[in-house]
Amino acid sequence: MGVAIRFLDDGISTEGTMGKMVVTILSAVAQAERQRILERTNEDRLEAKAKGVKFGRKPRVDKDRVRALHSQGVGATEIARRLKIGRSTIYKILASDQTQ
């Protein structure tokens, strides 16, 4: 036992063999359209990147200030409070300095 949809105004139904065919065709068209949108979006993104457009949000953390405060002996919690950023961000900046 399944579910069938009837569009009374348009005279379209998903019942029977013809109804299943209509659903299959509509889903194939929707899938093709989705693929086309993805391709266009990706092409435009690559074109923008080639022109030098930067994606993502702008960094708002002054890494040099974090390093300076840390070298003055200020703890990560206090640096985070002063700069209004997460403490984990402080740890990531300091850890990246150690791996370089």
Image: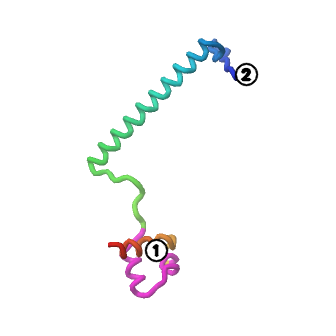
Residue at 30 percent across and 48 percent down: it is 49
Amino acid type indicated by mark 1: Tyr
Q: Which residue is disc 1 drawn over?
A: 91
Q: Nearer the viewer, residue 81 or 28?
A: 28
Q: Which residues are magenta?
A: 61-81
Position of residue 95 relative to residue 16, above or below, is below
* Callout 2–callout 1 Cβ contact below 8 Å: no
Image coordinates for residue 14, horizontal then vertical, percent: 63, 17
Label 1 residue SS? helix
* Label 2 packing within 10 angstroms: few (<14), some (14-19), many (20+): few
Q: Which residue is disc 2 drawn over?
A: 1
Q: Nearer the viewer, mark 2 or mark 1?
A: 2
Amino acid type indicated by mark 2: Met
Say which quadrant the N terminus sits in: top right
Image coordinates for residue 2, horizontal then vertical, percent: 70, 22
- Colouring scheme, one of rainbow, by chain, secondary structure, one colour: rainbow
Residue at 42 percent across and 69 percent down: it is 61
Q: Is residue 25 left or right of residue 1?
A: left
Label 2 residue SS? loop
Q: Residue furthest right?
A: 1
